[in-house]
Image (cartoon, grey):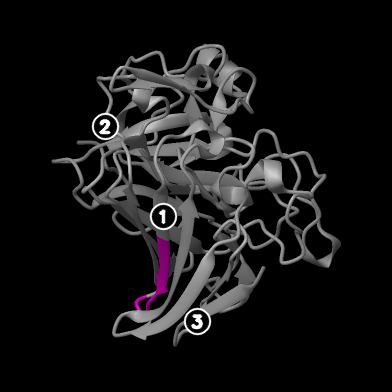
Amino acid sequence: MKIHTLTNVHGIEARIMTYGAAIVSLRTPDRAGNFANIVLGSDTLAPGLAGVSYFFGATVGRFANRIANGRFTLDARTYQLSQNDGVNSLHGGPQGFHQCVWSAEGSETSHGTALRLTYVSAAGEEGYPGELSAHVTYRLGDDDALTIDYEATTTAPTAVNLANHAYFNLTGDPSRTILAHLLTINAERYTPVDATQIPTGELRAVAGTAFDFRTPQAIGSRINDADEQLSRGHGYDHNWVLNQSQPGMMTLAALLSDPDSGRSLEIRTTQPGLQFYSGNFLNGKPAADGGSVFGYRTGLCLETQHFPDSPNQPAFPPTILRPGQTYAEKTVLIFRTLPDGSAAPSGSTSIVA
């Protein structure tokens, strides 16, 4: 297991661990120029020990999010996957990509320092067909953007959905909750879930609900509303249907800001969905650097992805990769600071269509 460090001319630093191809640290400045780590993670988390079940900063796959009953049918053959979330499969199973040591190769490009990580998943691993060659490239540019490129090829038809599972806390203080963060999501609809958190197949309008983040909303303002969906997720743990003019087009996904520190994050992606998870199951057990712990709702995830359970939902954007094809998706994290007296990023007052 090794840790590689990417830096830019403004002092922003990303530390990437080969175990899980994970972001373990991401240091950015507040409005006063003070740097702090804005993701939950630890250099000291050993493989197979504390923190694995929370997927801190990891690349998750083969299939990010849930697959119902850990099962899907492809070309008239049914595949049984490992079940690690009740009856469902979650984030590729208990020995998914977050549990693997990836090979890494660093480089300097005209767009900044880059790290390309590779993992070859054997045919049958966690029940998935085909040998999958997966690549994740992190690139930190002097434009203060961290770009994440995903690529994969396969020897047999298989389901693929790669995502990063970083937990953000823009205060830079992991003892504080994320409930005062302001969040905007560029989506008119989301995918409601059943009692096991599998999408029902409905694309439900966010208007008039606690899931409407088309204008900046404090995360804690409606998280305890009497809403069946919030109850099923123990808070927010749902996929939003991003407003894309056409499939695969780079699209604004979300804007996140912390009014106190002035840090803000803009997320753009080619992926069709965004899973917003409000850290509902963090419980203070995994230790962080400096003796800190990650408590209840001290981090949030904004996972760009395809929709959960897509192999079993033919109306959802497809996630089947076949030999001769290349899976390719991109997500860009853009770091900014807000001026004094500003609570939300400029231009983010509304993204209602």
> Mark 2 vs mark 1: which is more N-terminal?
1
Judged by depth in the image, the label closer to the viewer, 2 or 1, is: 1
Residue 140 lies in the magenta stretch = yes
Residue 94 in picture, x, y percent from top left = 64, 37
Judged by depth in the image, the label closer to the viewer, 2 or 3, is: 2
Residue at mark 3: 7
> Mark 3 vs mark 1: which is more N-terminal?
3
5 and 300: which is toward the camera: 5
Residue 312 in picture, x, y percent from top left = 36, 19
Q: Secondary structure at mark 2?
A: loop
Residue at mark 2: 318
Q: CA distance from mark 2 to mark 3?
A: 36 Å
Which residues are drawn in magenta? Answer: 136-143
The amino acid sitting under disc 2 is: Pro
Q: Is residue 317 left or right of residue 293?
A: left
Rendered image: mark on residue 134 = 1
Which residue lies at the image location 58% right of the left edge and 38% below the top edge?
278
Q: Residues within 10 Å of mark 3 (few under 14, many from 20)?
A: many
Image height of 137 relative to 131, above or below: below
Which residue lies at the image location 53% right of the left edge and 27% below the top edge?
81
Q: Residues within 10 Å of mark 2 (few under 14, many from 20)?
A: some
The amino acid sitting under disc 3 is: Thr
220 and 316: which is toward the camera: 316
The amino acid sitting under disc 1 is: Ala
Q: CA distance from mark 3 to mark 1?
A: 24 Å
